[in-house]
Image (cartoon, rainbow, N blue to C red):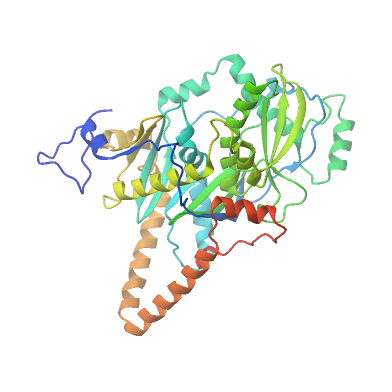
Amino acid sequence: MGLKRPAEDDPSPTGKVAKARIESDHALAFPSLSHPASHPPAFQRPSQLLTFSYSPSRVLQFDDSALRYFVNPPHGADLNYGYENWTRRPEERGRIDGLLSAWSRFKKSLNGQNPEIGVISWRGVITKILTAPYEERDVWELNVMCVDGTMYFEEHLSDAKLKEKSDLEPRHRLQSYYGYSFESYCTSSTPDEHKHHASSSSSSTSSAVGWGGDVDTNVQWCSVVKTKLGDTRIIIGGEVDCVRGKYAGNTDNFVELKTSLSIRGPQDEAKFEKKLLKFYFQSFLLGVPEIFVGFRKPSGYLTTTQVFQTVQIPRLVRGKPGAWDPNICLAWGDLFLSFLKNTIRGGSRGNVWRIKFTPKTGVSAVLLDDADVRDVEGGEDRVGFLPRWYWEEMSGAVAYDSEVRTQTRSEGASSKVTAIFSRDVLETHVKSGYLAVDQFVSCYLNPMPYKRPIPIDQT
């Protein structure tokens, strides 16, 4: 990476700014773990907007064809089974095209309304951000664009990083397969578990007992939710492994599937409790209430399983030496988003920023030059990392919104009074949906009905 062009709102006298200078001007220090937030930011319970599927040929379909249903796996299942038939999706850049297609489709149902959204991102990126205070090893980078007040996040994967992920050692590749194999044993194409086991038994001569089908990581079922951290409304998309029972059109019975080595002593227990941090936030962010963990031998054979209720996980580690605190993570996430807003807003709509997180150091932000933006585009029809069709769709929406605003201003003061009153009413409803972490836990544990999603145009 060479010299970076200066941010439009921070030019140097010479018009040239070195990378080191920009990084020092746009940096966020690593958070303190010894001083937990006294008033953690509120987190709004995720509400599902829509779902979509990816087919085996990686075609996005707005249906539930890839939806899977939870079934109990057989005891002692061999997670090595089917490895040679694994259809592995190639490693690729962390594009958000599928999520943007879903968001575009949902916005069309709002009859011309244009809700103010602070961030649009895949769940994995938001998980990296929130768990950063406890990350001790991995450096990560994001590409970020801010267009008309909305920040778009894309995980930045260099060619070297993509090659590293593609060229795993055979042992590591097999270990990564164990998680997918566990998903096959735990899922079915039908919500009727008796039918699944009957079907599995009839085909047991040609496949392992309880096997749900060969693994194809091209196939995914994804959920898109809206939530809010502090003052920032966020649209998050992510894969959902399966549902328990029949799918009712919300996140109430979503299940996340995970594998881990069997716990043989205090050291293994400590390692597992550290893993629970990512387990927790991955599910928390999509509103997934249940995590089903399969514990295995190093050889890949399943030993036991355990159900974890997502909202109870922080209590399992609280008070233990080196325990993680979700309130620290949420406070850091809120600070991170505020830092980005203050750093990247106000420049050109086409600016692309590279955000880099370094454990124990913090975050730096660099405005990419034209050569690096072309590298981000990767020779594809894009503006920055946003697909051109979405960029043009946004540009049309902005023109329409500007025209409507101009017309509203010309209608006089009475319309302004109505608008202010409506905003007050809406803000009251928004605040009533706020929940801090402890309140979030409490409302799930107490016998109270689950609060149904609020249409996005009301928040």
Residue 413 lies left or right of residue 8; in this view the side is: right
Q: Does residue 18 lie above or below 45 as drawn?
A: above
> To which quarter of the image does residue 305 belong?
top right
Pinpoint residue 355: horizontal percent, then vertical percent. Answer: 36, 37
Pinpoint residue 84: horizontal percent, then vertical percent. Answer: 69, 20
Whether residue 70 is visible to the viewer of this picture, yes or no, is yes
Whether residue 55 is visible to the viewer of this picture, yes or no, is no
> To which quarter of the image does residue 257 belong?
top right
Residue 179 lies left or right of residue 76; in this view the side is: left
Q: Residue 399 versus residue 435: which sits nearer the camera? A: 435
On-image quarter of the N terminus: top left
Which residue is at a point 74% across and 22% down the rendered structure image? 81
Q: Residue 158 versus residue 437: which sits nearer the camera? A: 437
Q: Does residue 257 lie above or below 62 as drawn?
A: above
Residue 228 lies left or right of residue 313; in this view the side is: left
Pinpoint residue 174: horizontal percent, then vertical percent. Answer: 64, 19
Give the mark count. 0
Pinpoint residue 2: horizontal percent, then vertical percent. Answer: 24, 28
Q: Does residue 405 lie above or below 224 as drawn?
A: below
